[in-house]
Image: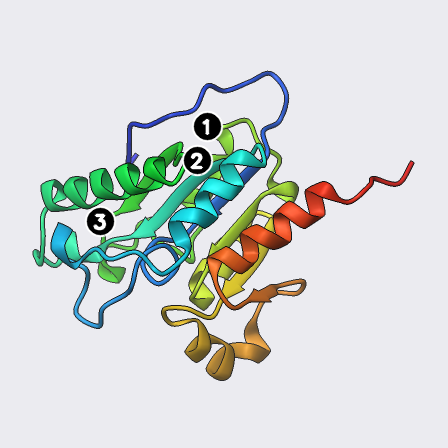
């Protein structure tokens, strides 16, 4: 593979897992115009740690799929990224949640790789790793390319309005994949998922 999951795997079960994939910058943590380059610059979006905890407690496997072309551009290193993700794991666990795996693409557009969203390479690998059904897998993102990546495998796209989300909705609203659902924040998405899980299932 041309990208590397940071090892934090959940145990794969025989049955398909309930899987939610999260974009990182602008969804879990605050985005920056000039890249999030260090652990000090990695600042959670308000409520996002609780959101991951709610998803974990609802029985979902949570994975992260993030484009990190700042590595390919030499703005920061894999070691810097690892430190940011260690902080993310720590804060999520303090809130009572778990991120079961992190996939990142270090490439730029010029590399023409298959892992950089909107291409579906990372998404396909995550779904395969956790033995999940693509059609039942959510991806929560703040950009059109996030939503296109999950749409390419037949999954469920969710747009949040944090990060670049408002700009995405205003500039690309007509291009969003069919059935895209829109939420103000990751916390709002997690509450929707919890309500869906609590609803009685039809026979």
In this rendering, the answer to whether 122 lies above or below 148 is above
Residue 129 image label: 1
Q: How is the image coloured?
A: rainbow
Q: Residue furthest top?
A: 14
Q: Position of residue 150 (x, y in %)?
A: 53, 52
**Going 58% across and 29% down the picture, which residue do you hit?**
17
Q: Which residue is mark 2?
A: 125
Q: Is residue 172 visible?
A: yes
User: Which residue is at the front of the view, 149 or 19?
Assistant: 19
Q: Residue furthest bottom?
A: 170
Q: Which residue is mark 3?
A: 106
User: Which residue is at the front of the view, 134 or 194?
Assistant: 194
User: Which residue is at the front of the view, 130 or 91?
Assistant: 91
- Ranked by sequence position, the earlier of labels 3 and 1 is 3
Residue 139 located left or right of residue 180: left
**Going 22% across and 49% down the picture, which residue do you hit?**
106
């Amino acid at each position: 593979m041309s990208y590397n999951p940071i090892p934090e795997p959940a145990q794969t079960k025989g049955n398909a897992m309930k899987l939610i994939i999260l974009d990182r910058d602008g969804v879990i943590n605050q985005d920056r115009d000039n890249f999030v380059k260090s652990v000090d610059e990695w600042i959670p979006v308000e409520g996002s740690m609780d959101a991951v905890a709610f998803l974990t407690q609802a029985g979902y496997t949570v994975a992260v799929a993030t484009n990190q072309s700042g590595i390919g551009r030499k703005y920061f290193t894999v070691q810097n990224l690892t430190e940011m993700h260690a902080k993310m794991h720590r804060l999520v666990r303090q809130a009572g949640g778990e991120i079961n795996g992190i996939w990142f693409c270090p490439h730029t557009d010029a590399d023409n790789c298959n892992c950089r969203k909107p291409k579906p390479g990372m998404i396909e690998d995550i779904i395969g790793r956790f033995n999940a059904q693509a059609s039942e897998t959510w991806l929560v993102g703040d950009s059109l390319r996030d939503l296109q990546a999950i749409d390419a495998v037949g999954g469920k796209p969710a747009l949040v309005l944090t990060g670049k989300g408002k700009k995405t909705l205003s500039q690309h609203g007509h291009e969003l994949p069919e059935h895209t659902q829109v939420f103000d924040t990751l916390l709002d998405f997690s509450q929707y998922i919890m309500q869906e899980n609590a609803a009685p299932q039809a026979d």
